[in-house]
């Protein structure tokens, strides 16, 4: 396959306005969308703002929306488009735009800080942590997250409803809560933090209607909904809506351990 | 710096909510997807609607649901006095003669509740019927959204109780399948095409039931330390394997239960005779 000239539409502007700008640009075999954006910078639009770093799908910087779908620019091959197709690239549409393809993702950092950190277990020093592989398998899937925030961008709870941003942590950080609640050594319960209950009461788990868009866009292929959000919802039910579990815990007086 | 009062460069801010909220990239289109994103929700809605129409007709019909030895899964167990007599079948007259309408209505509440609160079907109808969202990154048409935080949708949290109820229901359908190994004179050790239909249906019903997210949680998912509960860990792994196919099982078991009912209807109403194998 030889090179060809592709039609691109790239959003340019800032918080006060902007629009899609047309470009015709060379595409060569094996290139990804980020290569084309770089070529535009080099040849036609030297002031085009774009955030990127690794070009290997590992830093999570180059998130954008390509033909309306949230994706990593560095992991979207040009070969998925036909030569006739116009490729439209816009910034993430759930967050405030800074300039061109760069958005302010500060919302996610605020949400990250709202999640209580890992609580070290009493009487076990650093370096003395011992865990069985089967006990950490679940959390390890969630640790593959590269914090690209594509899931946060796609989730209709905040994408379509700005007013929900205060109440809703978003899939990435609800998954963080699930990770800690499944962590074999996390001692949050002993320190008085009930992660199951607060997931719903303080981090907005109830807003999620499990429609799985976060899972659909995750470039790491994490099964966010099936393995983190739904299990977390079931854990919240244990705490809040299941009189049998409630009664059982009263009688047996066993703490959250299992 | 800008104060927000000077005119924007190209596209004016439509000043609405969601993706058009102030501060976000000014793009008027509610979405820019170019693929056929509407196909999946449309197909889902059509499939669910077809089942609802069919099952409503059959559930209220109150006729042609028994063709010895087969009883339609919609009418089992049959719990009113107006049930057709089925030898050895699960009909107990818990509801007496005062129950005037179709006896299917009594028992169908449970499978209906199970599927209505199922995590997969929730996704399906929130997307297909309620457009919340219609597809990923396609703006939803609603002004406000509170998800499952309030009445009535907060009731989705009772799903596990329907799961508990689904186990005896599946047990009774298993019993019906055993009874299907008789012939029309109730002699044992026979098989017809209907028996095969029932076997396929019950396998799918069990697979769907055990692949439930609540099941996965109850058998082991709720634990913090799998290493201390090796048996439950194995059960959780098994439920997880099925759970990965929950959507597929939801559709195939929905189709098989409707087909099993249709089969009984066709035989009972005399459209054709059950081909006997032996
Ligand atoms: S599954 Fe829940 S968190 Fe994920 S995108 Fe859908 S509503 Fe948002
Ligand atoms: S969970 Fe997936 S989509 Fe969300 S931030 Fe992490 S890597 Fe990105
Ligand atoms: S540049 Fe690092 S993920 Fe794309
Ligand atoms: S039956 Fe679908 S999640 Fe329980």
Image (tube, coloured by chain):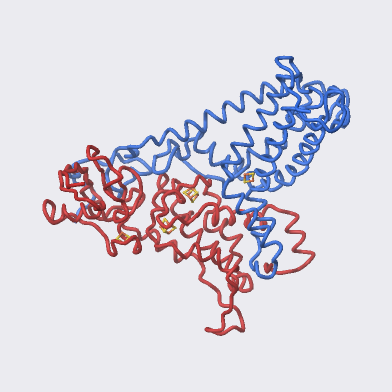
| Image quarter hosting the C terminus of chain A | bottom right
Across the whole image, how many numbered discs are drawn on residues?
0
In the displayed structure image, the side of residue B154 where residue A4 appears, left or right: left
Residue at 60% from the left image edge and 61% from the top image edge: A196
Q: Position of residue B62 (x, y in %)?
A: 76, 20
Q: Which residue extends farthest front?
A: B278
Shown colour of chain B: blue
Q: Which residue extends farthest left?
A: A43
Q: Position of residue B120 (x, y in %)?
A: 57, 43
Please name whichever residue, B133 or B179, is drawn nearer the observer in this view of the structure. B179
Please name whichever residue, A237 or B182, is drawn nearer the observer in this view of the structure. B182
The answer to which image quadrant residue B16 occupies is top left
The answer to which image quadrant residue B231 occupies is bottom right
Q: Position of residue A31 (x, y in %)?
A: 24, 53
Residue at 52% from the left image edge and 45% from the top image edge: B146
Q: Quadrant of ligand 2?
A: bottom left
Residue at 65% from the left image edge and 43% from the top image edge: B208
In the displayed structure image, the side of residue B29 where residue B85 appears, left or right: right
Residue at 70% from the left image edge and 14% from the top image edge: B271
Shown colour of chain A: red
Q: Is B261 located above or below residue A112 in the figure?
A: above
The answer to which image quadrant residue B172 occupies is top right
Q: Is B42 located above or below residue A188 in the figure?
A: above
Q: Is A114 located above or below residue A23 in the figure?
A: below
Q: Which residue extends farthest top?
A: B270
Q: Position of residue B34 (x, y in %)?
A: 32, 37
Please name whichever residue, B226 or B139, is drawn nearer the observer in this view of the structure. B226
């Amino acid at each position: 396959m030889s090179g060809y000239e592709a039609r691109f539409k790239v959003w340019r502007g800032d918080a006060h306005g902007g629009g899609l700008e047309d470009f015709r640009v060379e595409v060569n075999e094996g290139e990804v969308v980020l290569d084309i954006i770089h070529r535009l910078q080099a040849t036609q639009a030297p002031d085009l703002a774009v955030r990127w770093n690794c070009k290997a799908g590992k830093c999570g910087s180059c998130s954008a929306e390509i033909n309306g779908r949230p994706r990593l620019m560095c992991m979207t091959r040009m070969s998925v488009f036909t030569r006739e197709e116009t490729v439209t690239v816009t910034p993430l549409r759930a967050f405030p735009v800074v300039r061109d393809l760069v958005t302010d993702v500060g919302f996610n950092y605020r949400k990250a800080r709202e999640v209580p950190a890992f609580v070290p277990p009493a009487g076990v020093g650093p370096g003395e942590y011992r865990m069985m592989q089967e006990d950490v398998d679940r959390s390890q899937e969630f640790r593959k997250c590269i914090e690209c925030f594509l899931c946060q961008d796609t989730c209709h709870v905040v994408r379509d409803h700005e007013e929900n941003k205060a109440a809703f942590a978003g899939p990435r950080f609800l998954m963080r809560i699930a990770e800690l609640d499944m962590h074999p050594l996390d001692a949050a319960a002993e320190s008085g933090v009930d992660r199951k209950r607060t997931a719903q009461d303080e981090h907005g788990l109830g807003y999620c209607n499990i429609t799985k868009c976060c899972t659909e866009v995750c470039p790491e292929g994490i099964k966010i909904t099936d393995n983190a959000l739904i299990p977390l919802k079931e854990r919240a039910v244990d705490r809040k809506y299941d009189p049998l579990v409630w009664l059982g815990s009263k009688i047996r007086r066993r703490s959250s351990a299992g | 710096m800008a104060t927000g009062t000077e005119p924007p460069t190209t596209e004016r801010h439509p000043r609405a909510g969601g993706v058009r909220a102030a501060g976000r990239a000014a793009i008027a289109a509610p979405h820019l997807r170019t693929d056929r994103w509407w196909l999946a929700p449309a197909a889902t809605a059509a499939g669910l609607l077809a089942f609802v129409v069919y099952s409503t007709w059959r559930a209220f019909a109150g006729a042609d649901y028994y063709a010895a030895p087969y009883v339609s899964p919609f009418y089992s167990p049959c719990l009113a006095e107006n049930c057709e007599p089925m030898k050895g079948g699960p009909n107990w007259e818990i509801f007496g003669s005062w129950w005037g309408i179709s006896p299917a209505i009594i028992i169908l509440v449970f499978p209906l509740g199970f599927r209505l609160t199922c995590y997969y079907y929730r996704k399906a109808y929130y997307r297909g019927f309620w457009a919340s969202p219609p597809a990923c990154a396609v703006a939803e048409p609603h002004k406000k959204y509170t998800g499952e935080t309030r009445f009535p949708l907060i009731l989705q949290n009772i799903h596990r109780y329907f799961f508990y109820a689904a186990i005896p229901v599946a047990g009774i359908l298993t019993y019906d399948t055993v009874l299907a190994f008789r012939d029309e004179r109730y002699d044992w050790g026979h098989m017809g095409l209907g028996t095969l239909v029932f076997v396929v249906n019950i396998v799918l019903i069990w697979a769907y039931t055990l692949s439930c997210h609540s099941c996965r949680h109850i058998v082991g998912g709720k634990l913090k330390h799998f290493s201390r509960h090796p048996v439950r860990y194995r059960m959780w792994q098994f439920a997880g394997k099925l759970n990965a196919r929950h959507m597929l099982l939801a559709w195939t078991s929905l189709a098989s239960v409707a087909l099993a009912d249709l089969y009984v209807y066709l035989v009972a109403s005399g459209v054709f005779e059950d081909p006997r194998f032996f």
